[in-house]
Every structure is written in C-alpha cells, then in structure tokens.
Amino acid sequence: MCLHWEYAIAVTCTRCIPIGALLLALSSWAAAPCRAQEDEIVANLAGGRVIILPARDTLIFGAIDQPLEAKSVPPRVAALGPEHIGILFGASEWQITAQPRPLRLDRDVPETRPPGKNVYRPPDSGEPDLEAIGVAFLEKLRPLVSSLHHKFDLKPEDPIFQIVLIGYPRSYGPEVWLVEYRAEQESVGGATEYWQTHIQRPRFTQLYPPEKHEAKTVVEVNFPADPQPVPLMGLIQSGDPRIAQVRNADPKFAKVVELLERGQANKVNPDDAADFLRAVLTVLAGKSPFIEGKMEESRGFQWIVQPQEPVEKAKQDQDRPPDAPTLVRKPNPN
C-alpha cells in the first residue's frame, strides 16, 4: 500500500485539554518507488478555529478555515441527531483510489440514536447519546485507520481525528464537548517494516457548561495551535483595536462584551450575540472563509453563514422521517 500523508496538526482548547501536537509524517516506502494502486488511501485533514458564544438559551458558534496545505478540507458540520451537531477536524475526509469520490465523515456517518437502557456501557464511555455519536464515527474510522501500515510519529495522547460537539438536549441543557480519537501501532516484524494500526475508543472532555460558580464565557478550540492565536477573550481584555472597533460600532455589541467580561455569557441576547460573533469572525478571518450557526433549545440547529463549498444532498434514507435534522437548509431571514 502507498500512503501520502505529510501534515502537522496541533490542538488546544480553553479548558480541560492540555496542549498537544499531532505530527503525522508518513512518506513513501523507501525500498521501492510508490505506484498508485487500487488500495492506495489518502487522508485530507481539516484545520481551523472554533469560537462558541453560549448566549441565552442558544449556543452561537463560528469556525474559521485554516488550511494545513493545498489539499486541506475546511471544517465541516455534521448533523448528529436532533439535538447535536459536530464540527470535524483532523482526518475528516479519506480518498481511496479505487473509489471515484472521497469518503466524507460529515456525510457518511448514519444518523445516531442512543442505545437502550440495558445495553452494556464501558466504564470510560460518555452519556448514552454522546456514546452513540462517538461509536458511529469509531466504526466508520476503524477500517480506514487499519489501512495505515507505515510507521508514523504519533504520540499516544495525540488525536488523529476530533469533533467539537455542540448540543442542546432538553434533558440537560447547552453543552460543548471535545471528542478525541487516538490511534496506536504495533510492528508485525518481517523483512520490511509493516505496522498494524488500531483506532481507540473516543475520549470525551466537556468544555461547557463550566463548574458551578465558574465564569460562563467564550469557548475556543484551535487547530493547529502553533502559532496559537490569542483567544477572543484575550483580545477583548487587551484592548485589541480590531475588537474594540467592533465593540464600539453598536451599543448592543458593547453590552455583549460587558456580559462576557462579567462571565455572564448565558445572559447575552442571542440575536445580539450572533451579530457580534459574525462581526468578530469577519475581522479575525480576514480573507479566509468562515461559517456561523446556532443551536437553540426550541428550534435546534440553524445556519447563519453557510459554507462556501456546495452542500450536496446525502443519500436519502428510506427510514428517515421527514422532520429529521438536516444541514441542507436556507438561512433564516429573521
């Protein structure tokens, strides 16, 4: 098998996650020239920056595309049932030479449903609804990752794929999780280096809500982390002139910033928060594309700024109810 994969990724988030670097340096076989074969597999990685503003009864989020190289894919949003969406980073798209179209994990994972109450749950698993999402991606990644047979430099704590999971389950309330998938390798010996690669069960880390009595403020996740951008709250507190100009442009924005600085983001008017974040994303993104959306308690997911790449229709599931969640949606004019 030939594998072309030369990228560097790093990950950070505002709380609970240590800064880690993912270095994947998978080059061609040294013993002989590499030819395109039917089983050749190429992973296209997504990098970028996610900013989440937890406003009143609404989670407002934006993602800026930060390509890792010429063939990088943008951060993509996947509908994960009626109460969650996921922003995908890392190895989110796989191209197999024998297949005409790439396998996109935002599209090719079936709708997830929580397991029954009597189903066995491993000790390190998440809540049933989160575990169902994690396992659905795990099963899709397993055959792809197992096709990697060349040694790569990947630390045990570094993820190969990540999801920023944003949800508003009625039984719990607003939540943001970082779901990390790691891989491990073992040599099977022989005349040439040949490694078996295994994907591990996902690790769930909650980013929001914070512990009681802790500030409710902006949540950020950055890929890669080197160079690590100054987080939005750091820009606000340091008086960054770009953010100050946005703040002073509208009294509503000034009120949004005031509540963020007090650690009371959950009291921010959601419409004001959406307009403020869009203005901030425009400044921070520069010429890079970005998306924006919101997850509401009452109406679920809605786009505010849709992705620039065409939104293709996924294969229709005959068992899919007409009111099932979808990302093919026109922006709300209100």
Image: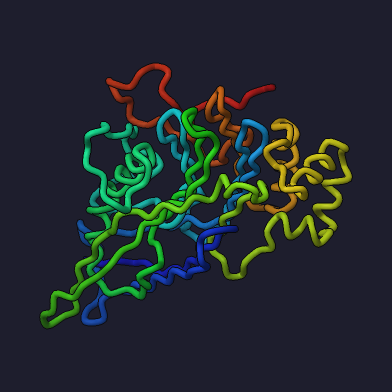
Residue drawn at (81%, 62%) of the image: 238
- Choose top left, top right, bottom left or bottom right for residue 127: top left
Residue drawn at (60%, 37%) of the image: 59
Question: Relative to the observer, which residue lies in front, 165 or 307?
Answer: 165
Left or right placement of residue 309 versus residue 244 in this view: left
Inspect this view and state whether residue 287 appears: yes
- Above or below, 156 against 233 in this view is below
The spot of residue 325 in percent (x, y) is 44, 26
Residue drawn at (36%, 75%) of the image: 153
Question: Relative to the observer, which residue lies in front, 42 or 142?
Answer: 142
In the picture, which quadrant includes the C terminus?
top right
- Choose top left, top right, bottom left or bottom right for residue 1: bottom left
The spot of residue 94 in percent (x, y) is 34, 53
Residue drawn at (84%, 46%) of the image: 247
Way the structure is coloured = rainbow
Left or right placement of residue 36 versus residue 291 in this view: left
Outermost residue on the left side: it is 190
